[in-house]
Amino acid sequence: MKALPFSSFIKQSLSWAWIYKRIWIIGFFITTTTISFQFWQDDSADLNIVSFFKDGFSSFRFDKMIVLGLLFFVVVYLISLIAKASILSGLKKIKQNEDYKVWELIKFGFRKIPRTLLLEIYLGIVNIVLAVIISLYFMYTQSAVMAVLFIVAMLLLLIYNVILYLCKHYAYCYIVFENKSTWQAIVAAWQLLRKNPKNVILAKLIEIVLILAIMAILVVIFFIGSAIVVTIATLSFLYGGFIIFIVILGFFAFIGLLFLLLCVKAYLSTFFQGFMTQVYWALNDKK
C-alpha cells in the first residue's frame, strides 16, 4: 500500500493544536502512563496481617499511605481515560468544522469510561499473566523447564507490548468514532494493523522520532534558561547583594517555567492525538 502523507498530517495537527487552544484543557490530562504490575520476592518487606500486628500503628499508617497513593493513581488514571475519549471527540468536531464546548466533550468522555476502562483491563490481562510466569522463574527452583518458560514469556511479553503500542490508539478510535464495543474495537484495531502494517509501524516510528526531537529541544531550552537565571542571580549577588531580588526572580522564573511546561504538555498531547487520529482516518478511508 502507498505510504500515507505523514508530513501533511503533522502540519495539520500542529495547526489544530495551535488554533483550537480550548482543547488544551483536555490534552493536559492525557497521560502516557499505563498500568504495570510487578511481582517482587522480598520476604523482609511483606505487608500483611502479621506485619501489622508485629509493627503496630506505624505499619497501619504506612498501609494507609499506600491505599491513598493507589486511590490517587486510580483517580488520575480514570481522568486520563475520560480525557482520551474527550479529545478524540473534539478532534472529530474540528475535522468537520463543528463548534464544540469543552464540558460537552468531557461528558462524552465520561460516558465512554465503561468501554475504555474495560479496554485497559482486557489489554492488561495478558501482561499480568506473563508477569506472573516470569516471576515464577525467580520464586522457585531455576530448572531448565523454568528457564524455557522464562524465555518464552519474555519474548511473548515483548511482542505483545509492541503490538499493543501499535494498536491501542486505534482501539480507542473505534470506540469513540464507531461506537464499537470494547472487544470489537480490539479486533478491529488488530485487523487494521494486519492489513496496513507498513503505515501503522511507520506512523509510530515518526511519533517516536518527533518525541525524541522535542525532548532534545526542551532539554536545550531548559539548560539555556537555567544558565540565564544563574547568571543574573550571580551578577546580582556579586554587584549588589540583592538577595530579595534573587528570591523574587527565582520564584517568578519557577512559576513561568511551570506554566510553560503545562502549556507545552497540553499542546503536544493535542498534537500527537491529532497526528495518530489522522492516520486512523486515512487507513479507514483506504479499507
Image (cartoon, grey):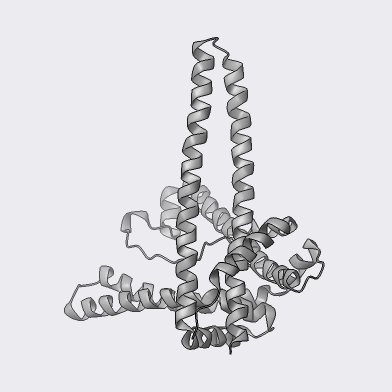
Identity of the residue drawn at 61% across and 73% down: 277
Q: Give the x, y percent position of residue 260.
A: 62, 43
Q: Is residue 53 left or right of residue 104?
A: left
Identity of the residue drawn at 49% across and 49% down: 62
Q: Quadrant of residue 132?
A: bottom left
Q: Is residue 6 left or right of residue 102?
A: left
Q: Quadrant of the C terminus?
A: bottom right
Choose between 5 and 35: the one closer to the eye: 5
Identity of the residue drawn at 24% across and 72% down: 140
The residue furthest top is: 240
Q: Give the x, y percent position of residue 220.
A: 46, 42
Identity of the residue drawn at 32% across and 58% down: 42
Residue 165 is at least partly visible in this image: no
Q: Is residue 225 left or right of residue 106?
A: left
Q: Give the x, y percent position of residue 35.
A: 50, 66
Choose between 86 and 65: the one closer to the eye: 86
Q: Is residue 189 above or below residue 277?
A: below
Question: How many numbered dots are placed on residues in this image?
Answer: 0
Choose between 234 and 139: the one closer to the eye: 234
Choose between 143 and 238: the one closer to the eye: 238
Q: Is residue 6 above or below residue 45?
A: below
Residue 175 is at least partly visible in this image: yes
Q: Is residue 84 above or below residue 190?
A: above
The residue furthest left is: 144
Q: Quadrant of residue 242?
A: top right
